[in-house]
Image (cartoon, rainbow, N blue to C red):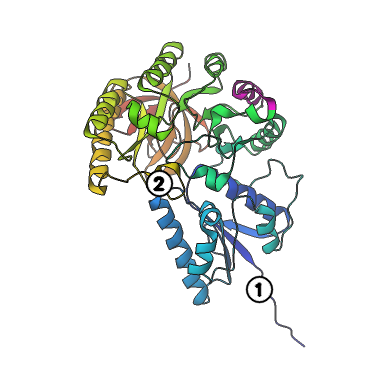
Amino acid sequence: MRTKTRKKNKINVITLGCSKNVYDSEVLMGQLKASGKDVVHEEEGNIVVINTCGFIDNAKEESVNTILDFVERKQNGEVDQVFVSGCLSERYKPDLQNEIPDVDQYFGTTELPSLLKALGADYKHELIGERVTTTPKNYAYFKIAEGCDRPCSFCAIPLMRGGHKSTPIEDLITEAEKLAAKGVKELILIAQDLTYYGLDLYKERRLAELLRELAKVEGIEWIRMHYAFPTGFPLDVLDVMKSEPKVCFYLDIPLQHISTPVLKSMRRGTTFEKTNALLEKFRTLVPEMAIRTTLIVGYPGETEEDFEILKQWVKDQRFERMGCFTYSHEEDTHAYKLDDDVPAEVKQERANQIMEIQSQISWELNQQKIGKEFRVMIDRKRGNHFVGRTEFDSPDVDNEVLIDAENHYLSVGSFVNVKITEAEDFDLFAVPVEEK
């Protein structure tokens, strides 16, 4: 007698939002794989887990639309189950349960064991550093802490991620060694706030020590820092950057604004003068460093004068890398009590002006690279080009180096020395050169 064969479940993990979510999805996938589950990332699967973002309006809208899309697919019989996790679910679970009840279950940011149980898997404590990486094989996001203790008025992250919690150095070294064994050459350090690393565990900032220990891991060649808070920045990190070749001359430090009244209302713990003094230290002590920052325009009460100060400052500082966002009025944040008094079209116009200034600066800085040689990591092949990055560039957000694939064969994941032949706002064109 023939019996009906039972369909084998395939779990499809969808990642929305920032690199911290990428990391969380990779940990989830690692746990599922260890339980013998068939798991894929953003491919076809009959069980879907959507790891959502709830940071600002655009991100929330994308998350909700993705949930609705997969709920419709479930109703059409294309998928069997839909689970939702991550920041949006953490922040708005009761509302989502009421508004989109066809989702099988919602889980917050700290409910990984419960999510795994719902997927028929067990949480394994011993799997420190075990992840299924979804980035190109040569680099990986490397989360060194969770949550944030900063009181920034505009930010909902503490509502979704909780207070700052550093991961012990020994656990991070174990994870780095496992990644290196898989061929990862670049660690991109992420957290809500790198600057605070170690204060909760060791009663002092230990980012510099962590960098030194990670640099000892064989196989890791680049270590890059993202999301360092400016207030209380540990300057011994600059000593490590200068003395340790593996630590990239690169720092992502979100400054958000420069007008002192706006910074005060944002509760950033700094001023125009203090911010500029810190940047001057960076430029003096490590002149080779590329600084990436992000700014917010249209914050409640931002006047034309505040904006003009910001514009002039961007022109004066000539940041190597920069992003600019319009203010999003987020409920339950301190700034939500303020009147969101800058019209949406004014916010957008201000962001456009800032990015226009930055685009020109980026073009001018890139022109200075023509004829110079750089060591480049090759991330992927796209069309007729191999796409790489210098140590001064992070994936997805910074300059890319394009090398003609029809005339040059390069291995993805390898390092190659190149000479820049042409430059645009955010693209550099290069040819390989022989290593001296």
Q: Indicate the quadrant where residue 168 lies.
A: top right
Q: Secondary structure at mark 2?
A: helix
Q: Residue at x 50, y 76 (%)?
A: 75
Could you say where residue 127 lies in the image, as x and y percent from the top left? 73, 45
Separation of residues labelled 1 and 2 (CA atoms):
49 Å
Q: Does residue 401 appear left or right of residue 410 in this picture? A: left
Q: Which residue is mark 1?
A: 7
Q: Is residue 428 magenta?
A: no
Q: Does residue 97 appear left or right of residue 313 in this picture? A: right
Q: Amino acid at mark 1?
A: Lys
Viewer-proximal residue, 277 or 383? Answer: 277
Could you say where residue 17 lies in the image, as x and y percent from the top left? 47, 48
Magenta segment, which residues?
Answer: 202-217
Can residue 258 be seen in this snapshot?
no
Q: Is residue 203 magenta?
A: yes
Secondary structure mainly formed by the magenta segment: helix
Q: Which residue is mark 2?
A: 336
Q: Secondary structure at mark 1?
A: loop
- Asked if 66 appears above or below 213 in the picture, the reply is below
Can residue 94 be seen in this snapshot?
yes
Q: Quadrant of the N terminus?
A: bottom right
Viewer-proximal residue, 151 or 171? Answer: 151
